[in-house]
Amino acid sequence: MNYTELTKLLNSYGLALNTMMYDALTIAPKQGAPYRNEAMALLNGEYFKLLTSDESIKVFKEAQNHDDAIIAESAKYTSKEILKIKNIPEKEYVDFVHLTNDSQQAWEDAKSKNDYSLFEDNLIKLIASRKKLMAYREEEQPLYTQLLSDYEDGLTLEKVDDFFEVIKTELVPFIDIVIEAQGDKPDFLTSHVPIEKQKEISKLIMDHLSYSFDFGYLAEAEHPFSSTFSINDTRITTHYKVDDFTSNIFSVIHEVGHSLYNHNVNPKFEGHAVANNMSYSMHESQSRFLENNIGRSKEFWIPIYGKLQAIIPTTLSNISLDEFILGINYVERSAIRTESDELTYPLHILVRYELEKMMFESNETPENLNIKFRDLMKEYIGINVESDDLGILQDVHWSDASFGYFPTYALGSAYAAQFMVQMEKDIPLKSGLMTGDLKPMFIWLKNEVHQYGGFYQADTILNKATNESFNPHHYINYLKEKYSQLLGI
Amino acid sequence: MNYTELTKLLNSYGLALNTMMYDALTIAPKQGAPYRNEAMALLNGEYFKLLTSDESIKVFKEAQNHDDAIIAESAKYTSKEILKIKNIPEKEYVDFVHLTNDSQQAWEDAKSKNDYSLFEDNLIKLIASRKKLMAYREEEQPLYTQLLSDYEDGLTLEKVDDFFEVIKTELVPFIDIVIEAQGDKPDFLTSHVPIEKQKEISKLIMDHLSYSFDFGYLAEAEHPFSSTFSINDTRITTHYKVDDFTSNIFSVIHEVGHSLYNHNVNPKFEGHAVANNMSYSMHESQSRFLENNIGRSKEFWIPIYGKLQAIIPTTLSNISLDEFILGINYVERSAIRTESDELTYPLHILVRYELEKMMFESNETPENLNIKFRDLMKEYIGINVESDDLGILQDVHWSDASFGYFPTYALGSAYAAQFMVQMEKDIPLKSGLMTGDLKPMFIWLKNEVHQYGGFYQADTILNKATNESFNPHHYINYLKEKYSQLLGI
């Protein structure tokens, strides 16, 4: 096979597995899971066999010198990915897959029974196993740096350390001020809103963001996510909670941010790795930009707040736009990351980051991670986490060995702020939002970020767009300005 | 690979392709179709390469002598399927696939423009190509017999000829009598019913039939179908028309009939060919039994008609149960097969059957099939088909070379009637329906039909269940009795 044939075949497996996963997480009946899981594992095996075959290694090595830069960059990326796994003995890889499967189950049990001891052994094994598999890579970098690079190519520990240092020193004291200045949490946030009404709200939001079912879809899933099948098929999911209608609103905006990124990639990239391999943090920058910088701004809601009120008058007819904006930006010292506000969010990530460093920067077995988690939550967010299900067990990521993933969430928000500073210099962003004309914003994002897919590293994109390397102070400034204005402090 | 490994791998491809197809026909965004179609074609190619490989031929040949009858029967079936395709030169097969793809497009164009000439060449080529490919089979039977057997293993031309002879002589004159005795078509059938209300009706029907999303799902599709992923994942689709709410009702009942058949197969069959390879006509017998014999009976509606009225009072509050039953059994000389009533339905099939015989029983190129179609419609249904989009172009089946498929639709109804005669001897069917207790009926179906999957040929199942080979007179009797009672004739 040549590069094109091989890539197309690999993509076919990828699309099949993606479709099956989207199906499994949205509509697929529970009882079919064992049969489906076995089939997916087999196809996954075929995919990996093909990807790491001698033929494949040769094809992607040669293609790195291709005249077409799209092919050359894609081949470089794929070759690097192959290098990460090709030396792992099959037996060890299979054991690892079994361990992650078992650990998912153990995590679910531990979480539902609020008993960390049911998961602790698995977590320790997962860390050890991850370390062991990484030893097969032909890399020199420290382990945690390698893990960070898995989610953002080129990311360094130093950069992330600097970032979190700024977060820690600047944000932790600022939160005290904000919470002091805030009133009570508004009742409308927990008002009962029937799912049918929330579906109308989803439609309102998607239309306003020009997200169309011609190239997308909105399904329901327990935990919202987006999934890209190809440039012209990139779908989202949401989860409706009758007592928390804004949760759906911001899920939809967030996932549309992801989806439009994939949809606006240079069409010439279709079928090549660079169409999809953007870094996780850059991806998160696009979802968080839309969700927070835009979706929680007053300007965004000016043209559509009346429509939202018309859909749910019982909930919103007595709530002014300003009250609504204060509500959707309400800051709380809360335990759950995914429900946290824009201001405390990065501190949740800081906690995970410090724990991950403990796991991977030393050879010792990490102990009492649940207690350490609670201590850090107390220190940074000022909250007493009462139990482990609301603590270390709240998130799925460690149960499938996705160590190094958490930091991308916070970095994404910081990239978003840096983009916004530049965007406001380049286009009349706020007036566009206020009149409901989002086109200039989307064109800016497409030209400066989306079109490049994964062709460039995150920092290159930042530099090209903002004439500056990553600078976390834009993020801090954005948050401080926003909340100072909101609360008049 | 051994039988188990090979079967599991083949099944994995099958499940992937099935999932992608269900996705494509329900929610997938249009713009992603070209990318998806290419990927599906590639995976399909991998599947066929594996299925027809020397290794596979050997494995399935050996497995025919396996001690486990499930494996032996499955291997026999699969070996037979391989034999049908393995000698076809790849080039010819690829040409055929291209021809069917082009012909789909040509058919759509021709139908939408109501211009048979845009499809005629393709149809003639499809017939010729089908004949040519069949010449590579190592079979002695006449071509049309072979085609019939593709959809029902063991079906003979003689049996089908006899069947349609009875239909022709008995049913054609009876329809005149029924239409004479009937009143006007009731208005409620075309009353406006919002889709949200129709979704509630779907739920009512599925609950009443014990069709659960634990092992199924209801999606929307342009043309309703059911799709089986595994014994515990067998899904249906429907299509909502605001001016024809009973269309959804009978689609749901029909597809549930298909789905429950696959769901009730002996669990030991899971993963083997016999779990899925029941004949098309036997499958259709289960969907049509539920849709027509049960779903259009007064007894079925007695316990739930009040609930239906409560969902759509504007449409049904002034319609008595008897009026409703007359309405859903209203007989019309209409052009469109899929919208036709229980009585004229087999005559639509008769028309297709006679045309297919013309195509495959002679070596001459069939001419003016559209005119012949109109002539036969006039002769058997007594209707002047005004244009070809309402005539020969109305159905998709010939555009993908599915010749021999149509007869299974009518045979299914006839098998259903034969089962019903026996069922009424074995269990108190009507009283069960009247009290809403459908369990005895489903147990009978499971024991006598569903559990066997494709392990036995259709006629064996009929014989085991009814102590009689296929006898079309049960069908005629059923229809005559039903309509005589309904109309008091």
Image (cartoon, coloured by chain):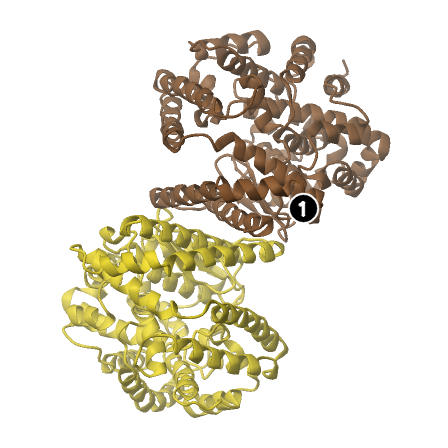
Chain colours: A brown, B yellow
**Which subunit holds the residue at mark 1?**
A
Q: Quadrant of the rendered structure where residue B226 is? A: bottom left
> Residue drawn 34% across and 53% down?
B211
Find residue A42 and report its horizontal and vertical position in percent.
39, 44
Q: Is residue A177 visible?
A: yes
> Vertically, is B209 above or below B187?
above
> Vertically, is A171 above or below A284?
above
Q: Nearer the viewer, residue B389 or A462?
A: A462
Look at the numbered disc 1 and give the secondary structure of its residue: helix
Find residue B372 and report its horizontal and vertical position in percent.
48, 90
Find residue B335 and report its horizontal and vertical position in percent.
49, 81
Find residue B481 and report its horizontal and vertical position in percent.
26, 80
Q: Nearer the viewer, residue A321 or B115?
A: B115
> Vertically, is B230 above or below A465?
below
Q: Quarter of the image containing the C terminus of chain A?
A: top right
Q: Nearer the viewer, residue B325 or A54?
A: A54
The residue under label 1 is A269
